[in-house]
């Protein structure tokens, strides 16, 4: 690893534009070609930069990187969110779902309340709800599928009732490839007063996603499903829901003030981003978004349709 002096000297010789271009991670994005060697080099550089920044404080480095690459805003635009503060960086979709299940579910679910899932869910969208159901006394109901692997919508509507609080559904099945009409799912769920969470891991690499048009309350995806690194992902949540939820984890970036008598929390999105962030992973995720949008999600979908 380079020494602190070597890295600081290298940074000092770079213009903001040069450093910004380095952090963007990809060359020749206009041609849609990702350079794995460049990506690995960038991740190594960023991790070394992180180690330099950790003493005496990583905060100025974090703020510099965030201001240069604006990953919150890039991800907001990618998902069609209304506000970049609705974008929470997590370790992956699994952590995002656990965050919602624990924070939202821990305060909103009571004994006898219902969580509706589908038979085609990945276990990361099953087990977190089982855990919170055990804690709160909530009940899980499961929507069946037909012989073609499609959700039976009549059965879905029959499962909804006055005790339905959460509907958690995959956007695209990882096992069957079924594309779920989540806009309709959200509309029906909202008509019954329920909140929705959409697992978008298999959707974001293959189709354009607009969380506002879908009217999703929560939407999650993992970076490695989008040609990015592992250990990074995104939780989108409507700001009114996120603001009402208690923190999922404590310490680090999520605090505003700390005292032994009590502490206060930072505003969104930092309230849910405890500890030191995954700087390199966040920036590499932004580069992956650049890569996909550079090709064009519509072109990707059209090519898959031809195949």
Image (spheres, grey):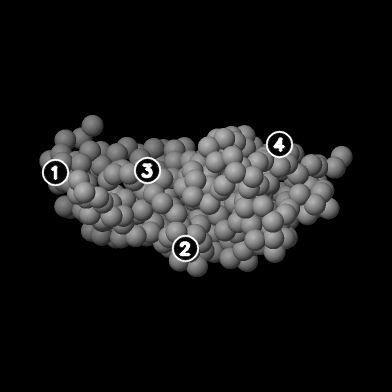
> Is 290 placed above or below 221 here?
below
* Label at residue 239: 2
Task: Using a 10 Å C-alpha cutoff, classify the residue at mark 3 as few (fewer than 14 neighbours), some (14 to 19) or many (20 or more).
Answer: some
Q: What distance separates the C-alpha of mark 3 from that of mark 4? A: 32 Å
* Label at residue 56: 1
Task: Using a 10 Å C-alpha cutoff, classify the residue at mark 2 as few (fewer than 14 neighbours), some (14 to 19) or many (20 or more).
Answer: some
* Residue drawn at point x = 57 percent, y = 35 percent: 134
Give the secondary structure at mark 4.
loop
Task: First in sequence, mark 2 or 4: give its number.
Answer: 4
Q: What distance separates the C-alpha of mark 2 from that of mark 1? A: 33 Å
Residue 223 rendering spot, x and y as whole percentages: 50, 44
Give the secondary structure at mark 1.
loop
Any part of residue 54 in sight: yes
Do the residues bearing badges 1 and 3 touch, measured as CB atoms within 8 Å?
Answer: no
Q: Which residue is mark 3?
A: 249
Q: What distance separates the C-alpha of mark 1 from that of mark 4? A: 47 Å
Q: Nearer the viewer, residue 103 or 95?
A: 103
Q: Which residue is mark 4?
A: 175
Number of residue marks: 4
């Amino acid at each position: 690893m380079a020494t602190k002096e070597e890295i600081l000297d290298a940074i000092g010789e770079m213009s903001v534009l040069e450093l910004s271009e380095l952090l963007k991670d990809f060359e020749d994005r206009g041609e849609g070609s990702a350079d794995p060697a460049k990506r690995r080099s960038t991740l190594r550089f960023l991790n070394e930069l992180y180690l330099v920044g950790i003493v005496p404080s990583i905060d100025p480095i974090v703020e510099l990187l965030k201001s240069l690459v604006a990953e919150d805003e890039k991800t907001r635009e990618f998902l069609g969110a209304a506000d970049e503060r609705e974008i929470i960086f997590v370790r992956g979709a699994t952590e995002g779902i656990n965050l919602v299940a624990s924070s939202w579910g821990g305060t909103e679910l009571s004994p006898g309340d219902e969580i509706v899932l589908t038979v085609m869910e990945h276990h990361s969208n099953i087990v977190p709800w089982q855990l919170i159901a055990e804690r709160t006394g909530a009940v899980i109901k499961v929507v069946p599928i037909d012989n073609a692997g499609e959700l039976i919508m009549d059965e879905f509507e029959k499962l909804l009732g006055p005790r339905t609080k959460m509907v958690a559904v995959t956007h695209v099945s990882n096992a069957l490839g079924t594309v779920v009409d989540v806009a309709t799912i959200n509309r029906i769920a909202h008509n019954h007063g329920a909140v929705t969470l959409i697992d978008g891991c298999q959707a974001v690499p293959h189709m354009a996603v607009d969380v506002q048009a879908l009217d999703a309350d929560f939407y999650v995806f993992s970076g490695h499903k989008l040609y990015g690194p592992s250990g990074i992902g995104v939780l989108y949540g409507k700001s009114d829901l996120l603001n009402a939820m208690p923190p999922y984890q404590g310490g680090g970036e999520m605090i505003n003030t700390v005292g032994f008598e009590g502490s206060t929390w930072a505003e969104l999105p930092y309230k849910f981003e405890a500890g030191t962030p995954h700087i390199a992973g966040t920036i590499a995720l932004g580069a992956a978004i650049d890569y996909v949008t550079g090709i064009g999600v519509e072109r990707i979908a059209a090519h898959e349709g031809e195949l």
